[in-house]
Structures are given as C-alpha cells and as structure tokens.
Image: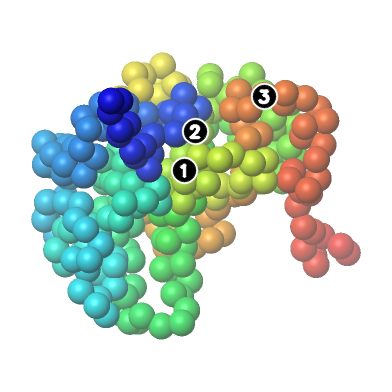
Amino acid sequence: MSETPEPALFYSAIDWSHGWYAPVRATALALQASGDWRRYLNESAQINLVQNHAQQRISFIAQECLPEGVAYEAFISDTGQVPTRENLHDFFNALVWLTFPKIKRQLNAMQAAQIALHGIGKSRGSARDAATIFDENAALLVVDNSAQGDALIAALRGHEWQQAFVQQRALFGRQAEVWTFGHALMEKLVNPYKAITAHTFVVRADAQFFTASDEGKRQWLDQEVATRLSEISLSTADYTPLPVLGIPGWWQNQSHEFYADTQVFRAKKRSLSDRH
C-alpha cells in the first residue's frame, strides 16, 4: 500500500532563483528546509533580535490573535506581535521583517503614529498611504553616486525606457541594483506578468557598495533607508514607477521590441506647464 503524499505547502511552488527574490532567498530556502515555517520565522526573529520601535521582540502569531476592532499596524506597534495568515501575502511580509528589520520597524512606527493621530477612517491619509505603498509595493533602486547614476535616474523618472534599459543596460549590476521590498510585490511576482510595476525608492550609494558582499549590502541598505525614512516626510512623490520585468537580466527576450510595448512601458504624462 503506497503512502499518501504530503500536501504541498502554500509556498512550495515558488521559484526562488528569480532575481526579484534575491533579498529574501537565503532566508526562504532555509525556512523551506526547516519543515515548520512559522516556528522558523519566530526562531529567526528571536536569534536576530528583531524588534519593533518600542524594543519589543517581533513574533509571528496566528491572525485569530488580532483583537477585533484593533488596527493591524497599531497592534504590532503595541505588542511586537505580527498577525500572520497561512498565505503568500503574509508569508512574504514575514520574510521582509527578517531581511529588512530596521526599515520594517520604521514603517510600522510611521503607520502607528498616523493611526494614533487620525484613527481608522475610510481614507488612510497621505502620510499613512505613502508608508503603506512602500510596505506593500516598494523596490529599492540603488544607484551609484556619479554622473552616470544621475543620468540613469533621470531616464527612469522621465520614463525613457529605451535609454534606461537598453542604452544604459550595462550599469545594472555594476552601478545600479534593484532590491525588491514590498511583500505584495513579491506575492504578485510568484506568477509574473509583464505589467507588474514597483514603486521605486531611490537610494544613492558610493562605489564600494557595489563591491560589498550581499550581506554587507543588505545591512547597509536596511540602516540607510530606515534612517532616511525617519528624517523625511514620506509622500507618494518620492516614488518612481518601474516595470519589474524590464530590469535587465530579470526576464527573457528583453529586446528593443520588448521595451516598445507602450501598454507597459508608458510615456510620462505631460503636466499642464509642459504643454505651453
């Protein structure tokens, strides 16, 4: 009599080899090998001293433990406990907590502060909305602090896709890197499609960043971005749209025609001042 096969876990089919999963890949593969995803998350958070802004240890608990009527972000801020469902959305959120704990801590502090000020209403308000967009859909665009870096950022902000992704293609991996951050973005990329677009947050770095180890880069980014977020009034104007599958090397057949698809690689909308 043959044994009944073990049911596939909800994250079993993810292809971790894709470039967009590089930031969380090592943690994800170790978790997958552990056999108990929630236990692994909590043990890793404890070992790495992951905390919220009130210095409470982060732990990942069942969604049912979130009291009715209590805002999710406020609950994490008050208790250090992250309600985590058995689904890809919350799974990626937990992986990002372990990968970028300082950024996540700062975002949670920002969201909780806005809830304390304005409560929970039909609208999140501009500041909380900007923090939520970062949390859900951001990618960190790390660019060399040089004239070439300036030109690449200008091309991306101007939606000059051929210039950024074809003419300046060689910069990627040498003087520019994209680190996915948003957990909803990572979830969408489980089943990738061409129109997936990240809200990129530009980070300028000196040349030594690009020769550092992956762990060194991760630690620097975590501290640098968390510090930046604590110093600025984050708004949606801080983001640059970036079609993720257009990033050089992240998808196959990235030809001139690939980037000529104006349904994905759209021209920038002209403002009223540009029309006169």
Residue situated in front as seen by the camera: 229 or 122: 122
Quickly name the residue at label 2.
20
Question: Residue placed farthest to the front in the image?
Answer: 1
Work out how far the residue at label 3 is from the one at label 2, CA to CA, in angstroms: 14 Å
Rendered view: 261 above or below 149? below
Q: Which mark is residue 252?
A: 3
- For the residues bearing labels 2 and 1, Cβ distance under 8 angstroms: yes
Q: Which mark is residue 186?
A: 1
Q: Is residue 122 left or right of residue 217?
A: right
Answer few, some or many: residues within 10 Å of disc 1's Cα (few below 14, many 20 plus, some between 14 and 19): many
Residue at screen point 36% across, 80% down: 120
Instruction: Tell me the quarter of the image containing the C terminus.
Output: bottom right
Whole-percent x and y of residue 171?
60, 22
Residue situated in front as seen by the camera: 198 or 59: 59
Residue at screen point 47% across, 43% down: 186
Residue at screen point 77% across, 32% down: 258
